[in-house]
Amino acid sequence: MKFSNILIYWYLQNNRELPWRSTRNPYFIWLSEIMLQQTRVAQGLSYYLKFTTTFPTVFDLAKADESTVLKMWQGLGYYSRARNLHFSAKQIANELNGEFPSTYKDIIKLKGIGDYTASAIASICFNEPTAVVDGNVYRVLSRYFGIKTPINSSAGIKEFKTLAQSLIDERQPGNFNQAIMDFGALHCKPQNPLCETCPFADSCVALEKKLIKELPVKEKKIKVRKRYFNFLVIKTDDHKTILSERTGKGIWQGLYQFPLIEKEKTINKEELISSEEFINLFPSTTTISLFNKKDIVHKLSHQHLHTQFWIVETENSSEVNINWDEIEKYPVPILIANFLEAFQQKK
């Protein structure tokens, strides 16, 4: 029996019941695919339901301001996804009269959409036979065919896309793509795959040659950069603080944060208050204390943020701009959101 037939038969018996599976509306499929990049289904599901309730059409999402979108995205991470989603929603609403592009060639032109997402939308919504390749697909194909080409190399990306395209069922490409992704997520799992009950057990190269743990192959990761953040959490006598929007193209663009002093290493209280940045912010007397007794290490894909939150109590400051009662309205990185939750509990 053909690979695609076995796969789709497995899918029809084992597929997950998910809200975006009951529609072919490209707006909803697009939302789900963007949210599930770098995010597990269990985590992304509540965000999907919240977004589709708040923004039931692409016009609703387009009309929202970016800060609202980022606030709703808070906790999902990789915030460029939310900014690109919002940008493309405005483009679809204003330039395309709300009509989602219907071919892979046009879908991939939207900001924030790459080969995988364009393939998913084109196949599921418009029946275009273009294969998806994500982490699940890499794992299934590399194990089944015994392919050792690194999946994060240019040669590997090309090889696996070509292979996936050759296997796709052209009569039901959407089902095939969802089947191979579900199979990787539920059956051919990264750790402890269910080989004993696998429908491909009699022809899987990795199982036969005991290569399950070795495949897929990945080239060595980029070196992780360590950064040392000191957030100054201001409390004035009249219950105000400083919160400002991050600009530029770095991490957390468009999110809000407390004043930040970045150093080359973890610093103590004396080093902090003697720094030029601190003196410029607080020329007058302040009371300062460290909230977290050891560094909070926040791990991003290519950098680890060693973070200290300093509570700075001062009579007043010309820079204060936010009432503490309103702080929850602002979109902040999950690192700061977690601090705020702990801080409010201790008050």
Image (cartoon, helix red, strand yellow):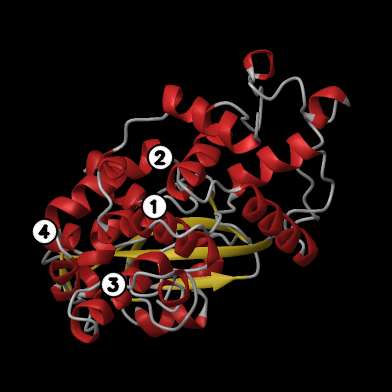
Q: Which label is found at residue 325?
A: 4
Q: Earlier in the sequence, mark 2 or mark 1?
A: 2
Categorize mark 3 by other alpha carbons within 10 Å: few (<14), some (14-19), many (20+): many
Q: Which label is found at residue 86?
A: 3
For the residue labelled by badge 3, is the local secondary structure a helix, a strand or a loop?
A: helix
> For this view, does 116 lie left or right of residue 85?
right
Categorize mark 2 by other alpha carbons within 10 Å: few (<14), some (14-19), many (20+): some
Q: Earlier in the sequence, mark 4 or mark 3?
A: 3
Could you tell me the amino acid type at mark 3? His
Rendered image quadrant of residue 331: bottom left
Q: Quadrant of the C terminus?
A: top left
Q: Is residue 334 visible?
A: no
Q: Earlier in the sequence, mark 2 or mark 4?
A: 2
Estimate the spatial distance between the alpha carbons at disc 1 and disc 4, rounded to whole Å: 45 Å
For the residue labelled by badge 1, is the local secondary structure a helix, a strand or a loop?
A: helix
Estimate the spatial distance between the alpha carbons at disc 2 and disc 3, rounded to whole Å: 21 Å
Estimate the spatial distance between the alpha carbons at disc 2 and disc 4, rounded to whole Å: 33 Å
Name the residue that disc number 2 marks.
Answer: 41
Could you tell me the amino acid type at mark 1? Ile
Instruction: Point out residue 112 in the picture as x, y percentages from the top left corner.
Output: 44, 71
Could you tell me the amino acid type at mark 2? Val
Q: Is residue 250 visible?
A: yes
Q: Give the residue displayed 27% in from the left and 48% down from the top.
A: 48
